[in-house]
Image (cartoon, helix red, strand yellow):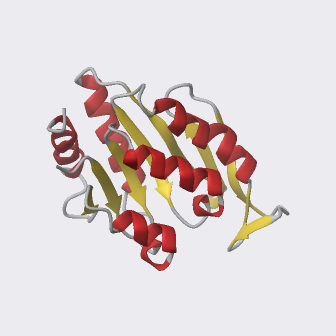
Amino acid sequence: MKKNFLVTGRPGIGKTTCVMRTAELLRGRGLRVGGMVTLEQRAAGRRVGFKVIDLETGAEDWLARAGVEGPVRVGRYAVFLENLERVGVAAVRRCVGACDVVVVDEIGPMELKSRAFREAVWEALDSGTPVLATIHVAASRNPFGRRVLGRSDVELYRVTFENREELPRVLAEKILGTR
């Protein structure tokens, strides 16, 4: 039986929104949902970076910022792996076995720079706890992304303009069916 549900789609299509809405539906059914999300940060109408947020505690910090220096770069962004690990990885690891559902948003180019992140994702996927994750559309170009997508317990959903309103309900029902 599949118990790991991954959401993909082009940038800006609503992957994170879909996962957040699914999490709210599951919480409404009494499930404990935790893990991490990354949210785009804007200033004056321009994307300036991303914050990583712990879904249970609300702790947050910068995952990546444009216009600043850093030892790890993805495109125009400096990526702060220590923040990802302190906030996001810790949230995922704490949630495995303690929550009813683990959220990982996103398995993407910035996050995959962290070995601790890759290990935490794999531990979550291997656990008995259902995982709801977003995965970057280009993840199949990354060896870890290919391994994740090749797992027999993963079901992949593509968010489109046509299905993005209904998909959270579909995912919530799938996850509830694993219980």
Residue 153 drawn above or below residue 150: above
In the rendered image, the residue lying farthest to the bottom is: 141
Q: How many numbered marks, from 0 up?
A: 0
Q: Is residue 49 left or right of residue 93?
A: right
x and y percent of residue 162 in the render? 19, 63
User: Can residue 42 be spotted in the picture?
Assistant: no
Residue 141 drawn above or below residue 88: below
Q: Quadrant of the C terminus?
A: top left
Q: Nearer the viewer, residue 75 or 114?
A: 114
In the rendered image, the residue lying farthest to the top is: 30
Residue drawn 64% across and 38% down? 87
User: Can residue 25 be spotted in the picture?
Assistant: yes
x and y percent of residue 26 in the render? 27, 31
x and y percent of residue 29 in the render? 22, 24
Q: Nearer the viewer, residue 40 or 57?
A: 57
Q: Is residue 86 left or right of residue 9?
A: right
Residue drawn 49% across and 67% down? 144
Residue drawn 46% across and 52% down? 122
Residue drawn 50% across and 44% down? 37
x and y percent of residue 52 in the render? 60, 44
